Image (cartoon, coloured by chain):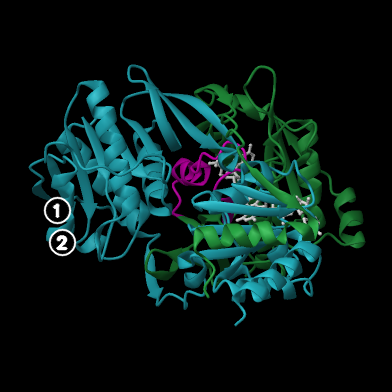
Chain colours: A cyan, B green
Amino acid sequence: MILVLVETDGSGVIEVSRETLTFARSLAEADGAGDLDAVTVGDLTDTARDQLAAYGVRTVYRVAGEAFTAFAGAAWAAGVQEARRRAGSTLVVAAGTPRGGEVLAHVAAREGVSMAANVLSFSEVTPLVVTRQVVGGAALEEMRLERQPAVLTVAGHAVEPRPAPAAGAADVVDCTPEVSEADLVARVVSTDAPEPDLSGGLRSARVVVGAGRGAGGADGFGDLLELTELLGGALGVSRVVTSLGWRPHHEQVGQTGSRIAPDLYIPCGISGAIQHWAGCSSAKNILAINTDADAPMVTKATYAVIGDLHEVVPAINAEIRRRTAG
Amino acid sequence: MSTNVLVCVKRVPDSTSEVVLTDDGQSVDGRYAGFTMSAHEECAVELAAQVTADGGEATVLTLGDADAVEQLRTSLAVGCTAATHLLADPQRFGPADVAREIAGVVRDHEAAGRPHDLILLGNDAADSGDFQVGIRLAYELGRPVVNGVTHVSVADGIVTARGAGPEGHETYRVPLPAVVTVLEGGVEPRYPSVQGRMKAKKVQIEQRTPATDPVGPNRVRLLLPPPAPSDVQILGKGADAAPAVVDVLERLGVLSR
Ligand SMILES: Cc1cc2nc3c(=O)[nH]c(=O)nc-3n(C[C@H](O)[C@H](O)[C@H](O)COP(=O)(O)OP(=O)(O)OC[C@H]3O[C@@H](n4cnc5c(N)ncnc54)[C@H](O)[C@@H]3O)c2cc1C
Ligand SMILES: Nc1ncnc2c1ncn2[C@@H]1O[C@H](COP(=O)(O)O)[C@@H](O)[C@H]1O
């Protein structure tokens, strides 16, 4: 019996939670234990409930009440524990989001069991053996989990979200667990309107021109910006570039920057470290420009030009201008 | 009233270049790439220095092998004032083990008249990435915990912590003693000055051994993800490749006319 902590937003169940439901369903099938239940905190819209049904959820434990009006990791964990007791789950799963990871770490600590973070797949069910991302995705770990209960988070984009072949009942059960004062001490006291999202253009651009250490300095971006403009795209940079203060942080692509998914990414002077790759691996085509033919970005790219970006990029710009003139 | 801070850092192999595993597949081999601590922990160290800038002790703690003294000295050079070294093979310690050992040190220090009002950790360690030591530590000590914040300040016995949430910037206000885990991005870690390094060398590091036997990390083994087969098409070398590049741009339909 598997319980999934599901996160929702204005549009319903968030994508990584739908991925996690898909992962949990395949685990439930392999386990032969069958039932998939969900726990949500706060309001549950009809859209979200319908999605949970489509993903094969049997029962939705809707945790609500005074204690859940503002986020508190410990209180949410108390809600998940209450749902688990009612559902009799032996596995508790959430998406590896900041909230998901935090709440399940609370659950694991309170239950006195292990937790596996950022799981990609499972290889055995009894005992449960999972493979998870470590070292920022540069390595994998096979890890054993006890089942009393087993607690794990699923890495983003480890599986494609797929509705169940047969819908579940998604019966809603209201849960208003007792929450102790101690569990409410660390809670959000205010939420500011989000800062204007300056990286929105980067994340939705069809073409992204990337720039790394190879740009050479804060004044090395002229040709790259011109190429960006000629292609009507956005500029994305590596962390070296933001750390050195050459460009602002909202332009950073990678594990600690934006994740992009353009039709074409043109990384120039970027080596392709795993943490950068984490942000650009969804690009449909990659055209790398690099002096080093063995750079990981070059070997992983669709196309590459070997050479100095300060020579290659101006030549591309000139060629584009020549062909688009008149 | 000054605040005493404990900040926990982990010596980890530098993973910005190629990652190599040890022969037994139990850990990342840092012999070639060198060692460091995570960016989150560097920011936690900086926050510890800021919170204690006007007084109070900033103690840095690590559970690690003899070489981990390097990370303690680095932290001492950028604002920490005391250091504790739990000398042990970190590969044998799972996140629950580490939390229990740190809690033991905190209780001992407290009994010796050195309370740690605020404990800072990274949100996740750069190697094992368990995302949980801080939260487990909070339960060991019976303290509240705020997770994954970028800004931390202390006034009148209350820690104010801010970080990004799903709906905007979130603020927590929690009475001390408390545990806070830090994400990079809110503060700029400072570079050690020559003076800082000199001072760091003189600090006597408290050495301890673990108080309990570790349960271990439940690790079967580490693996490297299979390398993606390269099917890159080299369009040419240098400026001469420009026409071939623009052909590709046309073919992909990203060139507006
Ligand atoms: C926890 C953590 C999180 C991280 N998050 C991110 C992140 O979000 N985003 C990110 O980008 N990085 C991140 N990093 C850093 C990452 O590991 C790399 O250090 C960084 O991506 C390297 O940037 P780079 O490719 O610009 O520089 P380098 O690795 O130094 O590569 C420069 C490349 O440019 C090439 N080159 C040099 N001169 C020229 C020239 N004139 N013309 C053409 N090519 C040239 C070189 O051959 C080389 O391939 C993170 C690291 C850690 C530990
Ligand atoms: N061996 C260790 N010594 C000191 N601090 C540690 C150790 N392991 C983990 N931590 C701290 O706990 C945080 C979270 O680690 P983890 O839960 O393992 O991802 C790290 O960022 C460190 O601040």
Report if the CB atoms under discs 2 and 1 are less than 8 Å apart. yes
Q: Mark 1 Cα within 10 Å, few/some/many (few <14, many 20+)?
A: many
Q: Is residue B235 above or below residue A217?
A: above
Q: Mark 2 to mark 1: distance in Å?
A: 6 Å
Task: Evaluate whether label 2 is on the same chain as label 1.
Answer: yes
Amino acid, disc 2: Thr
Residue at the far front in the pictured view: A326
Q: Position of residue A177 (x, y in %)?
A: 19, 50
Residue at the far bottom in the pictured view: A326
Give the quarter of the image for residue A54.
Answer: top left
Q: Quadrant of the N terminus of chain A?
A: top left
Q: Is residue A165 shown to the viewer in this render?
A: yes
Q: Is residue A241 above or below residue B82?
A: below
Residue B1 magenta-drawn? Answer: no
Chain letter for mark 1, please: A
Amino acid, disc 1: Arg
State the SS at label 2.
loop
Q: Mark 2 Cα within 10 Å, few/some/many (few <14, many 20+)?
A: some
Q: Which residues are magenta?
A: B117-145
